Image (spheres, grey):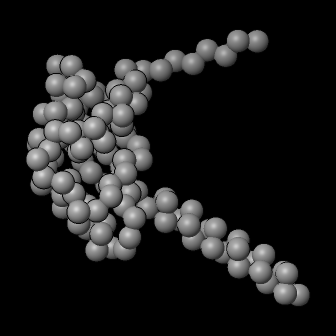
């Protein structure tokens, strides 16, 4: 039984955009971020006019805010570079959002480790 998967243009652009973002930060910007920014996923609207770019940073809220400020400050340059790298007629408007799912995963792992230690002690 064959499974047919239909990928829309938005899905393909999301994958390509995610690959290009790190290269743009490292190669195209003169300014370097003071924190390590990792792009985790993208969501492009069906009309291809808006894109949510999710990112994470290692560290606390201060590092998160520093990363967000850096991305917002360079949003226009990043969008222009994306447009030329992806060779698309219209590059979506970029909205950067912090992805806190990695923090949730770390917290769950801590809780599981604590449960295991408690069971071992009993």
Say left or right for 84 vs 122. left
Examine the image and state in which quarter residue 57 appears. Answer: bottom left
Say left or right for 84 vs 20. left
Say left or right for 47 vs 42. left
**Residue positioned 70% across, 12% down in the render:** 2
Looking at the picture, does residue 42 appear above or below residue 120? above
Residue 83: image x %, image y %? 18, 28
Residue 87: image x %, image y %? 21, 19
Query: In front here: 56 or 53?
Result: 56
Residue with the most extreme right position: 122
Examine the image and state in which quarter residue 24 appears. Answer: top left
Q: Quadrant of the C terminus?
A: bottom right
**Residue positioned 41% across, 43% down in the render:** 41
Residue 37: image x %, image y %? 32, 55
Looking at the picture, does residue 122 appear above or below residue 97? below
Q: Is residue 43 visible?
A: yes
Q: Quadrant of the N terminus?
A: top right
Q: How many marks?
A: 0
Q: Is residue 45 visible?
A: no
Residue 117: image x %, image y %? 77, 80
């Amino acid at each position: 039984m064959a499974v047919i998967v239909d990928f829309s243009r938005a899905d393909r652009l999301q994958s390509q955009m995610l690959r290009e973002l790190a290269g743009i930060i490292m190669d195209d910007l003169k300014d370097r971020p003071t924190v390590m920014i990792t792009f985790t996923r993208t969501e492009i609207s069906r009309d291809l006019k808006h894109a949510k770019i999710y990112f994470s940073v290692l560290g606390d809220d201060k590092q998160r805010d520093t990363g967000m400020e850096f991305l917002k400050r360079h949003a226009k340059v990043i969008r222009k570079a994306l447009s030329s790298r992806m060779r698309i007629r219209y590059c979506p408007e970029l909205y950067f959002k912090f992805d806190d799912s990695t923090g949730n995963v770390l917290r769950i792992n801590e809780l599981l480790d604590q449960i295991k230690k408690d069971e071992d002690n009993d």
